[in-house]
Amino acid sequence: MPSSVGRARPKRGPSIADVARLAGVSTQTVSRVSTGTDPVRGDTRERVLAAMRQLGYSPNRAARALRNGRFGTIGLLAHRFGRTGEALTTEAVVEAAAEHGLSVTLLDVHTPDPDRWERAAHLLSQQSIDGLVIIRAEKATPDSLALPAGLAIAVSDSRLLGHYPSVVADQMQGSELAVAHLLGLGHQTIHHVAGPADSEPALVRANTWERQLRRAGIRPPELIRGDWGAESGYAAGQQLAVDPSVTAVYCANDEMAFGVLRALHEQHVRVPQDVSVVGFDDIALSGFSSPPLTTIRQDFHRIGRELVGLVLAQLSAEPLPRASGPVLIPTELIVRETTAPPGR
């Protein structure tokens, strides 16, 4: 029989008692911070979290699930996390979840096809999650996306709005602000570089642009379809640069607007003296383009935090009524240097 003399015992990881001792609190307080089930005073909570980080303590989620029926994890389902809007919203979801002691499981869907979303939802249903956040489900519908009954769900910018608690930026308001700004400067018409046809936000922005022009007695010019990327904006800008009737362009997002700006510059079309350009999103780079971009700001950070708030509300009380309207996040016109009266 092999001797155990001299064999080192496995090193025990830090315990909840170790964290409590270092933070100067009770083990019950540490448990409340790690589970997020009960509020803990801000300074006490920060002291506990600092002790956890210092000791490398990680709560046992399996044990937690056995104790209170919770896994401490939220699922996050989106169409392309790499896109700017999804990335910024995801950052806010992860941040807000962490503040409540929750982790986030990400599942990316690369195409908008409903069957891909159905498979993604099936994969998530096999994982240990307490709730689910869905960002831009695009073509998915309640019929094509079978989600587990009783799961806490919050959605944003998708065809699932009205079926689950939801948070959306006021896309219609944003487009109205963009069109009103350009018309107010004296432009006789406004061209539009739209997002992809399978995107609900892109459709709302394009439809609002068209409706606002018709209300002003203007026949909308044919829109140019992009894919949210700067390269598609650049291609649209090349087309617009050779049309002498173009004096104002409303782009469905900032990245396509950057592409338009470059194409106009290369064709020696001055912005804003010859052509005014408005974007949508107000991403961080918008203030650093040349010239700085006039755009519509939507608060991705607030959207992400509100989504987590809806999930937490369902976990702590009765499910929210699905017939209630969405949490509507206002948009804002940010005027910089890419817009001016025509022919200035």
Image: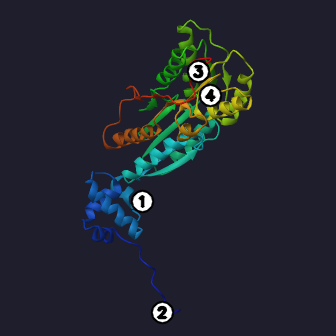
Q: Position of residue 245 (x, y in %)?
A: 69, 15
Q: What residue does disc 1 label?
A: 62
State whether residue 169 appears in this view: yes
Q: Earlier in the sequence, mark 2 or mark 1?
A: 2
State whether residue 145 appears in this view: no
Compared across the picture, whether 51 is left or right of 257 comes to left
Badge 1 element: helix
Dot 3: within a 10 Å radius of its alpha carbon, few (fewer than 14), some, or many (20 or more) residues?
many
Tag 3: amino acid = Ala
- Whole-angstrom CA distance, mark 3 to mark 4, is 8 Å
Badge 4 element: loop
Q: What residue does disc 4 label?
A: 195
- Whole-angstrom CA distance, mark 3 to mark 2, is 74 Å
Q: Earlier in the sequence, mark 4 or mark 2?
A: 2
Q: Quadrant of the C terminus?
A: top right
Could you say which quadrant of the image residue 144 lies in? top right
Q: Position of residue 295 (x, y in %)?
A: 53, 30
Compared across the picture, whether 30 is left or right of 180 comes to left
Q: Earlier in the sequence, mark 1 or mark 4?
A: 1
* Nearer mark to the viewer, of 4 and 2: 4
- Whole-angstrom CA distance, mark 4 to mark 2, is 68 Å
Q: What residue does disc 2 label?
A: 6
Q: What residue does disc 3 label?
A: 206
